[in-house]
Amino acid sequence: MFTMLAILVYLAAMGVPILFLYRYGSQAWYWHTIAVVTAVAFGLMPAPLSWRTPGVTLLFGFFFVLLMVWGLGGIVLYLPRHAKRV
């Protein structure tokens, strides 16, 4: 596998959720918690033997990093919405 491709894929996996968090802000805390739990489950799930190729490994890693960055970033940046008095 080309090293540059792996670097670009993982940079995209970190950049897309950061861009979405910057643009749209944090969603409800439970969506980000579900994303972190899904990322951990997805990262610990063993791939079937026929799927153990570099491309599938890169795809699994992409989704793991994407969900983990979005989930943790949303939890860290979570600001509860309170009613403001005018």
Image (spheres, rainbow, N blue to C red):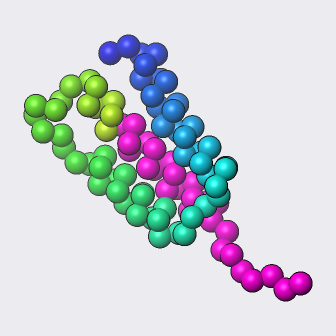
Q: Is residue 70 magenta?
A: yes
Q: Can you give x and y, in whole percent of width and height, for residue 3 in the image?
A: 41, 16
Give the image quarter of residue 74.
bottom right
Q: Residue furthest right?
A: 86
Q: Is residue 12 above or below residue 40?
A: above
Drawn side of residue 77 relative to residue 29, left or right: right
Expressed as whole percent of the image width and height from the top left, the position of residue 82 reads 72, 80
Give the residue drawn at x 48%, y 37%: 13
Tell me where the magenta segment starts and ends, as one range: 61-86
Q: Position of residue 6 (x, y in %)?
A: 42, 23
Residue drawn at x 36%, y 37% as measured from the top left = 61
Q: Is residue 41 magenta?
A: no
Q: How many marks?
A: 0
Asked which quadrant contains residue 50, the reply is top left
Return the residue found at the far top: 2
Q: Is residue 38 above or below residue 16?
A: below
Along the viewing direction, whichever of 67 and 43 lies nearer the viewer:
67
Q: Could you tell me which quadrant the C terminus lies in?
A: bottom right
> Is 12 located above or below residue 45 in the figure?
above
Residue 36 horizontal/vertical position (percent): 42, 57
Q: Residue furthest left?
A: 49
Place residue 80 in its image quadrant. bottom right
Answer left or right for 53 relative to 49.
right
At 57% from the left edge and 64% from the top edge, which residue is drawn? 27
Magenta span: chief secondary structure? helix
Q: Residue at x 54, y 69 (%)?
A: 28
The N terminus is located in which quarter?
Answer: top left
